[in-house]
Image (cartoon, rainbow, N blue to C red):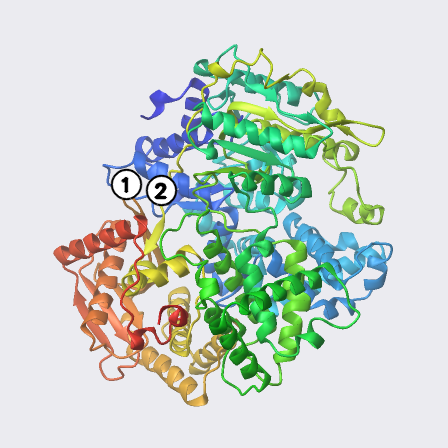
Amino acid sequence: MGLSLLNENQKKAATTVFGPLLIIAGPGSGKTRTLVERVVYMIKELNIHPKNIMITTFTERAAKELITRVSNRLIGTDINISEMYIGTIHSICLKIIEENMQKSIMSKGFTVLENIEQKFFIFSKFNEFKKVDGFEDFFEGKYFPTSWKKSGNLQKWFNRISEEGIDLSKFLKNKKTAFLAQGYIKYRELLKQENTLDFSTIQLEAYRILKENPIILENTREKIKFIMVDEYQDTNSIQEKIIFLIGEKHKNICVVGDDDQGIYRFRGATIKNILEFSKKFNNSECEIVTLNTNYRSESGIVDFCNKWIDSLNWEGYRHSKKIEATESKQSKNISVVKLSVKNSEREWAERIYRFIVYMKRIGKIDDYNQIAFLFRSVRDKRIVSLIHYLESKGISVYSPRSNLFFYREEIIKVIGILLYVFPRVDSTVFKEGVKSETLDYYKYCLKKIEKELLQDDEFKAWLESKKASYENMVDNGESVLDLFYELISLNTLKLHLKEEGIEILSERSSYNLGIFSQILEKFEKLCGISELNNENIDKVVGYLFNMHLKFLKEGGIDEFEDEKDFTPKGAVSFLTIHQSKGLEFPIVIVGSLDSVPDRKEMETEKDIEKIFYWEQPYEPDYRIKEFDFWRLFYTAFSRAQNLLVLSCVEMNSSKKEVPSLPFKRIYDDIVDISQEDFQMKNLFVDDVKIANVKDKYSFTSHILNYKQCPFRYKMNKIFKFQGKNGKDTFFGTLVHQTIENINKDVIFSKKIDIDIFKIEEWYYENYEILKKNERITLDEESLKLGLNQVLDYFKNGKEFLRNAIAAEEQVFLIRENYIIEGKIDLIVKENDEYKVIDFKTGNFHKDLTVEKNHRKQLEIYSYLLSKKLGVEIKTGILYYTKNIENPMVEIDIDQSSVNKTLMEFDKSIEKIEAKNFEKINSDSKKCEKCEFRHYCL
């Protein structure tokens, strides 16, 4: 292991640590191995502390893989890499915000909007944007017929402004662009009012905090002295600004990427970052290392990829490089073929089917997952038809982004049941004279349920009873999500919730129902709905079906994707090219050969687009689409390990030519898979590589929940069913967050005295934020009780607040098979002795099991902190906020007890990873507040 296994260029990249470094890493060139060895070299040979290293990755999966591989290389040493900053740029920016909340425009408990939530947010506030001067002029001449479509257009431009850090004064030249500037200002105001950020403004807020606070910036620079950025070709302007703002003092910035695989311009990425990186430094200050040996693909595939990328004149907008296959992959055997037919979609599907079956029958593949299909889009009707054809022939297909979510049987049933039991849907949903594809879909869902209830009297009785309860409704505190959890207890839906297994394909319906629970939870949050009643039910039902579900169906919902398993056993994979980025497959079949560089651009938006260029477009405007097209398919072709197949329905007519001109230049030179030149007997197909990723587990969120009920753990943590918090949890969170405000203020200001009115202000501000997020309210008596607990803590806790050094400290440790993590409420240091404090919003618990779990939690936290600091933690404190007289219980941390707790932790993780999720005997008292009580009892 180690540097000895690297080639010369990899070794140079791994050992060039000080100063700027650009690593151009071609496909399959051992980039991750090089980064792993670079980190190990820095830590072991140069004695650089892990806390001084920051690594940003493009995906969380890549971050987990790096952590896993680095930790495996350090097994047997005392080195703890838990303090290393590693994750996506978004996760690191979130960490910067959370560590410096006192200087953030956000408040504690802020939320982050995902893409579809952001669009719903803009849509829900659309009237605010209509009031902005220039609204009508901005949309004049654009075909966005609905407010929903207009919201999507605003979302696109708002994100561009955030991602590129544009000076808004640039937009003031005319009414159309001036509206965009004012609309963006309004958008940021609305985000602040709701205490939320989107993925673009996360970065902007982190950058602002660093830029406007010299002390925070200097502290960050002293902590982060070495920066590594993976997939640098897919970074945007604000990300580059953050990287250079942190790294410009020490200049130890290493960026890794391949400009030939820059495929995320549509998300704001700019190829300029990687092509111009070395020019940001003086003379030859920046080292450039090219990793050009491909260890992944057969030489024929490598040569084909080179031919494709070199077939275009790049006009200097590319790092020149020649990728070569490693010696063991050098072969004269043909490894690039075509598998096509002329003019018949049916014959194309049949030929693909016969190819797959033949490969399995002759033993070239052991599992269907050794074959992956890559397309520009998997939502195309022809691709979906191919999926259905293969499935009808008994070949399973994994294609989570093919827009099939709403057509799965379990989702059709849920929607049909909701339409059946909700009152007055004829007037709220199926309005007379209104026709649409979505309404036809709803009718299909409803008819399916009406047909089923004719054959099941018990099912019919339940539906009629529920329907009657809504028609003659009394306030019963039930929400739409509550109703959903009743539905899954019905036999018709229980069929789709198997109690054994968690595999993606066999349990797809369980994952889909989990996604639907999330849809309903987000719907309720967006509407501010906590429960249904006579006054709101018609409005809620109308909005749910006429807008929320309608927009989701029209836009498409992805099914579940496992970041550790993109090629589940027993199925061929249908993926988008973007989805396949960073992955590799033994056999790759590339479709979409009818594609051409998309030069369609709304003339009405060209003026806006020009504002986003600081001077002139970095690449010639008329070449951008062409460059992006070549990079996209280079990425697709280079995923193949053993066999690359180009496949299409060939056409040659005045209307359409397939393959299109860009492909025809190379397509005609490829042999058909049936020709004698291709020797199938010489083809060797690799096994699919198993992802090497360690998962994170915490004592409270994972171990305790698993011990209480393995089945509920599976439903919440594996299938991602949306949990529901009750008032007890809400109350505890409110008290805990306000205590956190006190602790962080004391540590930040280094002053023990806080105005009581300030504490009350924090308390009620936290309450309003939580109330909006959780849709739960507390009565005056409960609110007063919580405030008194907080004030009593401030009074009683001053003796250790004086010695507090950290609050809400994130700690984790990488063990052999998993990562253990936790968040310590408060750390104090008295006379060189560290103490861990954990707050419990209640009384000292007389239940021995609960009390033991509290102690075990402290033991885990003490163990993690001791590993982080390299000191022994001897004392922990449990602080019970409801115990006014004696709130503190001091616990001696005994190493033998800690070891025993760790062994229990290990055993629980073994059961989780062995997929042991058996149902326990139901306990009506313990289960009465569980969302799955209807299902189990």
Q: Are marks 1 and 2 in contact (CB under 8 Å)?
A: yes
* Residue 541 seen in the current view: yes
Secondary structure beneath label 2: helix
Residue at image point 63% right, 69% down: 544
Residue 858 appears left or right of 356: left
* Residue 134 seen in the current view: no
Secondary structure beneath label 1: loop
Which residue is denoted by mark 1 in the rendering?
79
Query: Callout 2: 10 Å neighbours few (<14), some, many (20+)?
Result: many
Query: How many tags in the picture?
Result: 2
For residue 48, above or below residue 107: above
Which residue is denoted by mark 2 in the rendering?
50
Q: Quadrant of residue 306?
A: top right
Viewer-proximal residue, 543 or 852?
Answer: 543
Residue at image point 74% right, 33% down: 597
Structural distance between the alpha carbons of marks 1 and 2? 9 Å
Viewer-proximal residue, 748 or 233?
Answer: 233
Q: Position of residue 928 (x, y in %)?
A: 35, 76
Viewer-proximal residue, 578 or 491?
Answer: 491
Q: Amino acid at mark 2?
A: Pro
Q: Position of residue 470 (x, y in %)?
A: 57, 81
Residue at image point 49% right, 47% down: 561
Q: Amino acid at mark 1?
A: Ile
